[in-house]
Image (cartoon, grey):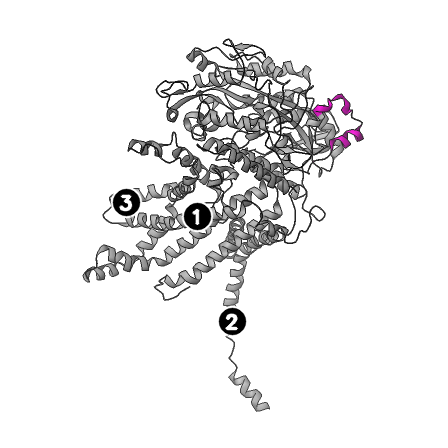
Amino acid sequence: MRTVLFKFLSVLILISLALAACGPAATSAPAATSAPAATSAPAATSAPAATSVPAATSAPAATEAPTAVPSPTIPPPVQTGGEGCDPGATQITWYIGLGAGSNADVIPLETAWAEKYNKSQKEACVLLNIVYNDGGGGNSYNALRALIAGGNAPDIVGPVGKNGRASFQGAYADVAELAEAAGFDLSKYDPKLLDFTKDEGVLVGLPFALFPSFIFYNEALFDEAQLPYPPHKLGEQYDGKAWNLETLSELAMKLTVDANGNDATSPDFDPTKVTQFGFYDQWTDARGVASLFGGGIPYDEATGKAVISDSYKEAFKWYYEGVWTKHFMPNADYYNSDQFNKGNVFPSGNLAMARVHTWYTCCFDNSKMSWDIAVMPEINGQITAKLHGDTFAILKDSKHQDVAFKVLADMVVDPELAVIYGGMPAVEADRPAFFAAKDKAAAPNVIDWTVAAEMLNYPDLPNHEAWLPNLAEANSLLGAFRTTMDSTPDLDLDAEIAKLEADLQAAYDSAP
Amino acid sequence: MSVVTRTNLASAPSRPRISAHTRRQWTWGFLFLLPWIIGFFAFQLLPILFTFFLSFTDYTGAAEFKLGNFNFVGLQNYKSLFVELDALPSMGVTLKFALIGIPLGLVVPLMLAVLVNSRRLLFSNLFRTLFYLPSVIPVVAGAIIFNGVMNAQSGWLNLLLKAIGIAEPPRWFTDPTWAGFALNLLVVWGLGNSMIILLAGLQGVPTELYEAATVDGAGPITKFFYITVPMISPVIFYNLTIGVILAFQFFVPALLIGTFNGNPQGSLLFFPTVFYREGFVYSKMGYASVLAMVIFVVTMAATGLLFFFGQRLVYYASGETS
């Protein structure tokens, strides 16, 4: 009896030791180690082009923006087992986590969609692998890397925008070849839309969802200041003035208020005690800021040189002046503060206007705030509404690319998925159902969605998320540049712009 | 000849005979160690060797890791170490952090340990708990809390500084001059573990030594430097070694607060952050492996130097020096 007990205890201890040996090293002391999980904005999606519109690329996740407020807990991955599948169906793994789709509220919708889809046909059996996207390119991105490196690559990934795809550059199959093999007619898509979904000339997906940008405004703050709401239609004037950059800036200053109740147009205004801001270009990087003044990229494809164009410089100067001289936009200290909701400024109730994309409806209580949307102002004789776009992509390492393409082709035209991800369907006929769902979520607010449809016609071309050599590194530099503008008073902006140009050139030169 | 042989055999040291009991103990000991040894090889040594291997390749993580999906690039990744913009400056950030953080990490917990060890302190258990409490808070949560506490506009630290008359308190995490130091404060906040270890050391100092010193007329300061410090020097040395190792690995709070760009203006761009960014954001696994090897070598060298020079200053009551 004693021998048995001794052996049992020995085995128990051996197992404990094995577990201890495999676990992370326990350290004490100061510092610390553990997983990162830096995030900034929630990982929204993004997307490009509109039907008749051109374009470039797109991508999700808010860029660098506010100084990250991470989630201390990361939800575990969710995997489905192929409920409703035909026994003979080919298993297709759909990986969600590079853009939208990994938040708890949409997971039940995704699993329900997969089950319904599996029952609807016999060829494919869709298995979901949903890994939480922390918005910082960590958790879900690393999980996908591990799957690929280990030879367990999923078949389909998405929804994913341009930036998300850039992290796995070269990992995607050419959808054009798969379409040709399947006899799928790509000519039904506007060629510009297809271009929008290409990375380095390779069609990595089919157009799916579009996310135009516009101005979200807080009606209560306008009412309080007794100011009229900004225009909902292009060509409309604002309070007797043309709706342009000057008018927007002036309006934003009137809506910026300090602790003593003075607005930013008052000589008594105290910029160190601001309690409410007029405008914020929320969750975008320096390219996004620059897109206010028109489309463009900091790269000359012909020469391979980094080029910060005049419109970029003009935009940066306007922006920097808005933050540090006219004070109608929050600096980093303000937008990271509790008072301004740690980066997600609009729902703080202390911001009058924010320029963001359609996907932003994900990120505040649509029915609690009194809000609506307005068109972008005219700047230098043109109107620009930067655009995001999402797609689903097939990995090169997928062992069933042909079946995966069939599933992908079904996904991009499924109106239910468009609603789940908050993207305007690329197919115009599907949009009324999409907006009806949005209205339901925003009630009792009545949102003028014609603004969103109208702004689709004014995308930034080239798109602010268009391909650049060494995109991940270039984006990092552009994100850091905006943060520098946000956090540094008395900056020699010309010198910083010149430094950005030089750094970008170095990044382009070291492109793999 | 036979005489010589006999003599040699006679003078040869006889090997101690290992008893069956001892052999059984060894076997069991080895068996108990085996899981750890397997775990060490599989999850620590192998990854280190694999990292070294990767450092000679251009693997990006975009394809399955197998021959044909990467190329051998010789020492190219090692050359990049001196060409890439951020590698060397980030080592400067790490060293600067270590130079401030390591002394702070020794002195502050020692002071706290002496305080909570004092018989004159009322409610010493309460203070021990309070000082230790931050150590049990996860790093991520701690970083979030500190980001809020040290916010230049709404953080209570600056509100406090303004209340006592400092009109323009530091912009902790947005001014590059202050950002690194602010992170040092975050580390000091979580020094409860070191304090507890030092407290255990303090409680192990024989009271007779203090009594004898008192008889000899020694004051509290003299006793502290001539009795307390030497007697707990092994514990201090342990804390110093761990502090050095962790300082070179420090990056999670910096990543959370300064993102992988080390905002503001690279002042929080620690060397391990660059490693993380190159590997897991830019997908340059080969180059990231070089950076990982650098962290490994620098940490090993620093620890080696510590043991070489530091051990001489450590007093071991048993007389052993290592």
Crowding at mark 1 (Cα within 10 Å: few <14, some 14-19, many 20+): some
- Asked whether disc 1 touches disc 2, contact meaning CB atoms under 8 Å apart, the reply is no
**Of helix, strand and loop, which one carries label 3?**
helix
Query: Dot 3, how many residues are within 10 Å of its Cα: few (below 14), some (14-19), or many (20+)?
Result: some
Within 10 angstroms of label 2, few (less than 14), some, or many (20 or more) residues?
few
Q: Provide the residue designation for mark 2.
A: B18
Tell me if I can see residue A88 in this picture. Answer: no
Which mark is drawn over residue B276? none
Position in image of residue A45 (x %, y %)? 60, 27
Q: Position of residue B279 (x, y in %)?
A: 59, 44
Q: Chain of mark 1?
A: B
The number of callouts visible is: 3
Residue lying furthest top:
A240
**Kind of residue sitting beneath label 1:** Lys
Check disc 2 and report its element: helix, strand or loop.
loop
Q: Earlier in the sequence, mark 1 or mark 2?
A: 2
Which quadrant of the view contains residue A144?
Answer: top right
Residue stretch rendered in magenta on the structure: A170-193
| Residue at the image position 71 percent from the left and 27 percent from the top | A195
Quick check: do tags 1 and 3 share a chain? yes
Q: Is residue A469 visible?
A: yes
| Most foreground residue, A298 or B211 | A298
Q: Position of residue A236 (x, y in %)?
A: 56, 10
Q: Is residue A181 magenta?
A: yes
The residue labelled by disc 1 is B96
Per the image, the residue denoted by label 3 is: B124
